[in-house]
Amino acid sequence: MINNRTKINGFILSSVSLGFNTFACLISCTVFLIIIYHLCYNHVERKDKITIVLCGHIYLTILINAIMLISMNIRSMLGDLYNQSFDSSWCIFSGYFAIVVLSKLYLNFLNQAFYRLIRIVYPQDRRFQSVKLCIMLPFIELIIITCILLCVLLPLNGVTYLPNDHFCYPTLTNIPSILSVAVIVYIGPFCCISFIYMYITRFIRQQRTIQTLVIKQRQSRDLLITRRILIIVNLLLILGIPGMTFIFMFIITGEENPLLARIALLPVSVSQMGLSVALLFCIPQLKNIVLNLRTTSTMTPVNRVVQGALQMKVIAGTQ
């Protein structure tokens, strides 16, 4: 059992995390619905459609992950207030599902990086520039990553009920389990994403000296977008640093903080909120969709007034 002071600190952590996750949930839900509406009711070029579809996958994953974290925050707060226990098979399932969703978030960013690699470095290769492939790939990856994580975590009893936090999640004291999760979910995808964007940046810098003016302008735009996306990569890095730090601290010292899971998940909530906003400014297609939506909503009342005035003139002329 933990003392009252620790409970208060845990309640504060859960409350702050709940605020960040709620904000991320609202933003990601709004943007995802805007993307669906734009794809259904507007003509979109193929290359832009792929980028928008990939962003839609990211926002959907952020939305699901935010909902999962909100559920954890609420359980933690109820447990702190009323000493409720949420230990059940559904709790264990939600713990495994949360790990799968977090892994899928990194894979979605990896898909985005891979598409930019193909579009910039290998533009003649059309096999990987298919809208159908971009739509189907996340579902295929979801099946594969779920099988991999379950095969690794189930024998290690990777997800357990955390009585101090009142939700189910991999415990940092299970070193084989948590290291496996770190490599599969965080280290592997992040290293691939970083390598791809470093390769793209190096490729653009090398090609700028031998290309025509039009191609140079396009590559300058690609380089600018790549630099902006590096902000997102940094947010992905921040997302996992605290957890990795606590893992190595526990390995070295053998001491476990009773609120370790909540402390490690707080930066995840902050990074998730930052990602939901940063994508709007880093991806030109998304930014244009939102700006066009604002312009349309602003112009619609004006257009109605103009149309009403014209109709009144026509009626007066006929009389």
Image (cartoon, rainbow, N blue to C red):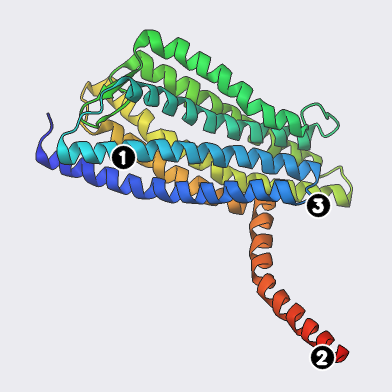
Q: Residue 83 at x, y = what percent?
A: 15, 34
Residue type at mark 3: give it.
Answer: Gln
Q: Is residue 186 above or below residue 21?
A: above
Identify the residue position indicated by label 3 in the image: 217
Q: Residue at x 82, y 34 (%)?
A: 123
Q: Name the mark on residue 316.
A: 2
Q: Residues within 10 Å of mark 3 (few under 14, many from 20)?
A: few
* Mark nearer the viewer, 1 or 3: 1
Q: Which picture quadrant has residue 167?
A: top left
From the top left corner, tell me how far across and down residue 40 is, in percent. 72, 46
Indicate which disc, 1 or 3, sits on the residue closer to the N terminus: 1
The front one of 298 and 188 is: 298
Earlier-in-chain disc, 2 versus 3: 3
Q: Considering only order in the chain, which callout, 2 or 1, is on the residue closer to the N terminus?
A: 1
Single out the mark in the foreground, 1 or 2: 2
C-alpha distance separating marks 1 and 2 = 64 Å
The answer to the question of whether label 2 and label 3 lie on touching residues, with beta carbons closer than 8 A, is: no
Viewer-nearest residue: 198 or 47: 47
Q: Residues within 10 Å of mark 1 (few under 14, many from 20)?
A: many
Q: Which mark is residue 311?
A: none
Residue farthest toward the top in the current orientation of the protein: 155
Q: Which residue is mark 1?
A: 73
The relative height of residue 306 versus residue 270 in the rendered view (above or below) is: below
- Is 188 or 248 nearer to us in this picture? 188
Task: Give me the C-alpha separation between circle 1 and circle 3.
Answer: 47 Å
